[in-house]
Structure formats: structure tokens, C-alpha cells
Image: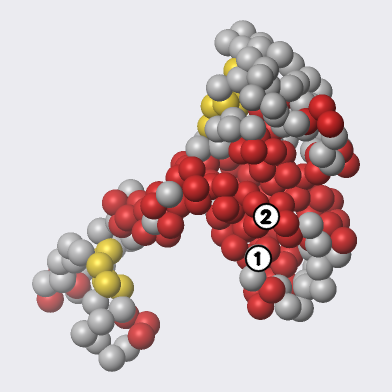
Amino acid sequence: MNRSFLSVSARRTYVHFDDDSADSESSGDTHSGGKLPLCDTLLSNISSREFVAFDDAHGYSSLNEAALLELCDAARAGLAKGNTPEDTAEKAMNFLKAAAKDETYGISTIEIATVRNARMDKLLADLLSPERHVAASPTHMWKDLATAERLQRQWRARFREKYFDLDQTRYLGLTKTGHLRDVVFDDRTNDDRHLWRARHCEALSEGEGNLQYEAG
């Protein structure tokens, strides 16, 4: 299970992502250039059993990328089909709100590898592209698109070209260690079903092809 470690203090705060205060801007949240305010809605201060785990022994938190990927995929599927469960939409939006608030304070709790592995950039793109969820009739949980737009802008500013190259990085990963390893694209054929072929494929001789093998 992939985990991304958060560089945070050992202060442990039990706050859930469904806290409606995650998107509220109170006077105590204003950063005036001095000491960073202790804000429970910051992702770096949140300890959740589902997405963020806290290690008491070593004093750091870690993001559960597998759980985040499952959440993002479920949210994107719901947007496309128009049947996003309310709890899924709520969890996704509140996580994005907490992440955006961290970015506002300059706290880098989410690295580019986590964005890539959990496909969080895809979720932001889908949220900000109405044509991708035109049939969804987004509920009130999806209407706070300003958060998605702000987080996308913040990540683009921080990660720069790495953010725009995420798809290319994913593709390279597939060809090196993923499902496309030892497979090459061949567009010389007119059969769309055989555009991909094994890189090293040795044809059996007539004798080998005629051999009969018993299972077991």
C-alpha cells in the first residue's frame, strides 16, 4: 500500500473531513506573516483513519494513496454517470478544501507523486469540465468548484511543468514497469484490435506448435 509521508509536527488533532468548517475563512485563519495559525481544518493537522494515518512512534503522518485513488476514481465515475453518492462527494470536496488551505499557507503536504498516483489532477479536471459530467446534475456538494479551481491553480504554480507532464509520466511508467512493459505500439496494421504487440515474441516452430501438453 502506497503512502506519502507528511512533514508535520507531532501535534495530533482528531478532526474528520466532513467538518463544514473546512471551507470557512475565519479571522483566525489569516496568515499575517508571523507564526502559522493552528487550524484544525489544515490537512497537515488532520488525522483520519481512512486517508491520513498518524505514527505516534516516529511523529509523522502519512497519506494513504490507495484510499485516495479509490475515492478519486469513485468521484469521477459518479460525475460521469450522474450517480455520485453524497458521502463520496462530501469526502472528496472536503479533502480538496483541506489540501487547498494547506497550499494557501505554503504547507506542501501533498507531493506530485501522490497527485499522480491518486489521479487527483484528473478529479480536478473533471470537476472543472462541465461537459464531462453534464448528466450528473451536480448536487450541492459539487457546487463549490472554486475550491477545485484554486487547488488546480496552486498545484500548477508549485509543480509547474511536472503537473502538466503527469499523463506523460504515467505513460512512461506503464511502458517501463506497468501493464505496457515489453509491449509496443504498431500502427502498420489495419486491424485496430492488434495495434499493440509483444516486444519479444518468438513464433513456435511447426513441431513445437503440434506438441500436445497435458495440464498439471
Give the vertical position of 114 relative to 93 (above or below).
above
Residue at the extreme top of the image, as rendered: 57
Decide which of 156, 177 is in the foreground and name it.
156
Residue 117 is situated, as x and y percent measured from the top left of the image, at 50, 47
| Residue 183 position by quadrant | bottom left
Q: Secondary structure at mark 2?
A: helix
Q: Kindly identify the residue that appears in the image at 65 percent across and 74 percent down.
A: 132
Give the vertical position of 28 relative to 174 (above or below).
above
Q: Amino acid at mark 1?
A: Leu
Residue 45 is situated, as x and y percent measured from the top left of the image, at 71, 25
Residue 211 is situated, as x and y percent measured from the top left of the image, at 20, 68
Residue 193 horizontal side relative to residue 10, left or right: left
Mark 1 and mark 2: Cα distance apart in space: 7 Å
Q: Which residue is mark 2?
A: 148
Decide which of 41, 91 is in the foreground and name it.
41
**Dot 1 or dot 2, earlier in sequence:** 1
Badge 1, how many Cα within 10 Å: few under 14, some, many 20+?
A: some
Q: Which residue is mark 1?
A: 128
Badge 2, how many Cα within 10 Å: few under 14, some, many 20+?
A: many
Q: Kindly identify the residue that appears in the image at 77 percent across and 45 percent down.
A: 94
**CB contact under 8 Å: marks 1 and 2:** yes
Tell me if residue 203 can be seen. Answer: yes
Residue 70 is situated, as x and y percent measured from the top left of the image, at 65, 50
Q: Amino acid at mark 2?
A: Ala
